[in-house]
């Protein structure tokens, strides 16, 4: 399963969030590391949602966003997570 993630440059590295999973955030020093760290955060976030009997949202196929003029760098990309471990509900 693929989730869209937003990666934003900060003064100390990168901040990453998942629009489909409010509260699922991470930080990293590089873009490459950001993708790995947020994939792990998504898996943990989904596991906690499952343990709490919360509905796990299906990933969106698109997201609307506007560019932050004060940010040095912003990226929107897909991150793959192991869907065999997570039941998805709509």
Image: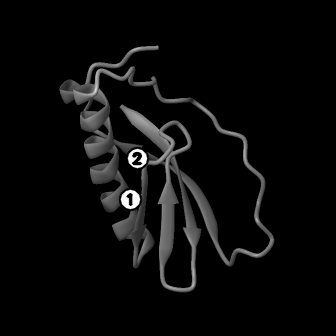
Label 1 and label 2: CA atoms lie apart by 7 Å
Q: Residue at 32% across / 42% down in the picture? A: 45
First in residue order: circle 1 vs circle 2? 1
Residue 87, percent from left and from top = 27, 19
Total marks shown come to 2
In the displayed structure image, the side of residue 53 where residue 32 appears, left or right: right
Q: Residue at 47% across / 39% down in the picture? A: 21
Tag 1 secondary structure? helix
Residue lying furthest bottom: 11
Quickly name the residue at label 1.
35
Quickly name the residue at label 2.
79
In the displayed structure image, the side of residue 8 where residue 18 appears, left or right: left
Q: Are marks 1 and 2 in contact (CB under 8 Å)?
A: yes
**Front position in the image: 41 or 30:** 41
Residue 76, percent from left and from top = 58, 53
**Front position in the image: 33 or 88:** 88
Residue 60, percent from left and from top = 55, 29
Way the structure is coloured: one colour
């Amino acid at each position: 399963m693929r989730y869209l993630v937003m990666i934003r440059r900060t003064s100390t590295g990168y901040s990453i969030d998942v629009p489909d999973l409010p509260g699922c955030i991470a930080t990293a020093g590089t873009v490459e590391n950001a993708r790995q760290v947020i994939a792990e955060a998504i898996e943990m976030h989904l596991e906690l949602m499952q343990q709490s009997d919360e509905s796990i949202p299906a990933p969106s196929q698109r997201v609307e966003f506007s560019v932050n003029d004060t940010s040095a760098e912003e990226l929107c990309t897909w991150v793959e997570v192991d869907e065999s471990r997570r039941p998805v509900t709509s």
